[in-house]
Amino acid sequence: MKAVILAGGLGTRISEETHLKPKPMIEIGAKPVLWHIMKLYSAYGIHDFIICCGYKGYVIKEYFANYFLHMSDVTFDMRSNEMHVHQRKAEPWKVTLVDTGDETLTGGRLKRVGEYLKDEEAFCFTYGDGVSDLRIDKLIEFHRSHGRLATVTAVQPAGRYGALERDGESVRGFIEKPRGDGGWINGGFFVLSPKCLDYIDGDQSSWEGEPLAQISKDGQLMAFEHAGFWQPMDTLRDKTHLEQLWASNAAPWKVWP
């Protein structure tokens, strides 16, 4: 099975970083968040990736073109003009990088990579800026069990602030960042049939808009509930939080050895 990852947006809410690089290349623990997402899929046996590039897509291409340089010790012999790579840390990945346009919306980006998906029974699809401890294998199993065209992972994001636990005017405790209002939202991490691409008109089609709404109206969308860890990296505050989790060896999304 293949996994399609959106990696072409501007990331305007974290412009402190994205003026130099695309959002999926912002680092957590010296590795791009894109790498973390790919490691999650790879932990469940998905090694074939299609990356939808756009804004500063050349940064992503250069990263994978020089992957050994980023991941290994290297000796440069300047006299003989030779390079020696030590301790090669290869991933079992096949990575297809597709330029889907700087201004293309999410649905349009997915539509543009359709030629790489036409022979697939189903494929995974997600955003390039969020991590989770989602059981990808259980998600795929659920998708195959219901026989519909699309599955979305439903999540309950944590509240932004802590909450007071009260008994009238008396404060009995403090709850650190409880779940939000109880509603389930689109957490990304879709499993889709290639037939879903027929719902997308073109470059200016937002996947979260008309295509997903029409798939739902047609009774072809199912939700896989995930009550575990899920965190998008929308702001510098989010990045700092994820960095702290990684640095403390408490990153819930690190499901690989």
Image (cartoon, rainbow, N blue to C red):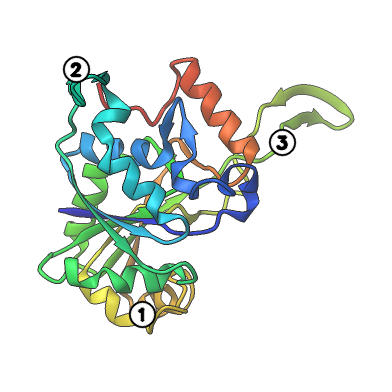
| Above or below 203: residue 49 | above
Q: Residue at x 15, y 71 (%)?
A: 118
Between the C-alphas of marks 1 and 3, the distance is: 37 Å
Image coordinates for residue 59, horizontal then vertical, percent: 40, 48
Residue type, mark 3 in image: Tyr
Q: Residue at x 41, y 27 (%)?
A: 252
Going from the N terminus, do you reach mark 1 or mark 3 first?
3
Residue type, mark 2 in image: His
Going from the N terminus, do you reach mark 3 or mark 2 first?
2
The residue positioned farthest toward the front in the image shown: 79
Image coordinates for residue 249, horizontal then vertical, percent: 43, 16
| Above or below 133: residue 75 | above
Between the C-alphas of marks 1 and 2, the distance is: 46 Å
Q: Which residue is mark 2?
A: 86
**Disc 1 versus disc 2: nearer the observer:** 2
Circle 1: element type? loop
Q: Quadrant of the C terminus?
A: top left
Circle 3: element type? loop
Between the C-alphas of marks 3 and 2, the distance is: 46 Å
**Disc 3 versus disc 2: nearer the observer:** 2
Residue type, mark 1 in image: Ile
Going from the N terminus, do you reach mark 1 or mark 2 first?
2
